[in-house]
């Protein structure tokens, strides 16, 4: 079964951007690994970073409220770090590459929905070029 978590706060820490979320809903001894993959959830205006377990995936939703920090990962060459309240911190492997690819695909592409397209263009447009 795929579980879903949501980033609730984000902050700049030295050379990283830390994305924080509560993970008490997950099994305490769950072994998590970054997948290096990012999906788009147009309905929720979110990017989804995927964590892997031995037999399932954990979707970590990064809502629009935290896209400015996502942009900083790209523009300031900072590392994204995912901090889970009950499971430690993980480097968000592949985040920059995946975001750059998705931003290029979403910009000017109404297939993602007009609200997702305009939101991405508004926040990430300077990065796209």
Image (cartoon, rainbow, N blue to C red):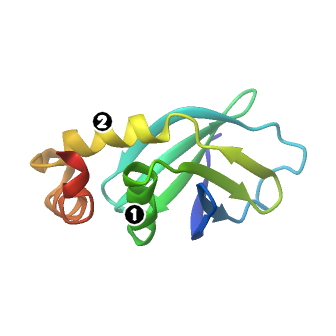
Classify residue 79 as left or right of residue 108. right
Classify residue 33 as left or right of residue 41. right
Residue identifier under label 2: 101
Q: Position of residue 61 (x, y in %)?
A: 51, 56
Q: For the point 37% across and 53% down, which residue is it?
A: 75
Which quadrant would the N terminus be assigned to in this image?
Answer: top right
Considering every residue shown, the one lying at the far top of the view is 54
Task: Answer few, some or many: residues within 10 Å of disc 1's Cα (few below 14, many 20 plus, some between 14 and 19).
Answer: some
Classify residue 90 as left or right of residue 88. left
55 w.r.t. 46: above or below: above
Task: Answer few, some or many: residues within 10 Å of disc 2's Cα (few below 14, many 20 plus, some between 14 and 19).
Answer: few
Task: Decide which of 8, 27 is in the foreground and name it.
Answer: 8
| Residue 123 image-quadrant placement | bottom left
Q: Could you say which disc has been placed on residue 118 in the image?
A: none
Q: For the point 20% across and 65% down, which residue is it?
A: 122
Label 2, label 1: how far apart the Cα atoms are: 15 Å
Q: Earlier in the sequence, mark 2 or mark 1?
A: 1
Residue identifier under label 1: 67
**SS class of the residue under badge 1?**
helix
């Amino acid at each position: 079964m795929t579980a879903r978590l949501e980033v609730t706060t984000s902050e700049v820490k030295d050379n990283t951007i830390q994305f924080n979320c509560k993970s008490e809903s997950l099994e305490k001894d769950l072994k998590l690994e970054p997948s290096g993959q990012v999906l788009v959830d147009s309905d929720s205006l979110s990017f989804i970073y995927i964590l892997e377990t031995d037999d399932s995936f954990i979707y970590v939703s990064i809502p629009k409220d935290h896209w400015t920090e996502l942009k900083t990962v790209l523009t300031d060459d900072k590392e994204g770090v995912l901090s889970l309240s009950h499971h430690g911190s993980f480097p968000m492997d592949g985040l920059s590459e995946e975001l750059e690819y998705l931003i290029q695909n979403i910009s000017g592409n109404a297939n993602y929905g007009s609200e997702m397209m305009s939101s991405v263009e508004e926040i990430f447009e300077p990065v796209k070029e």
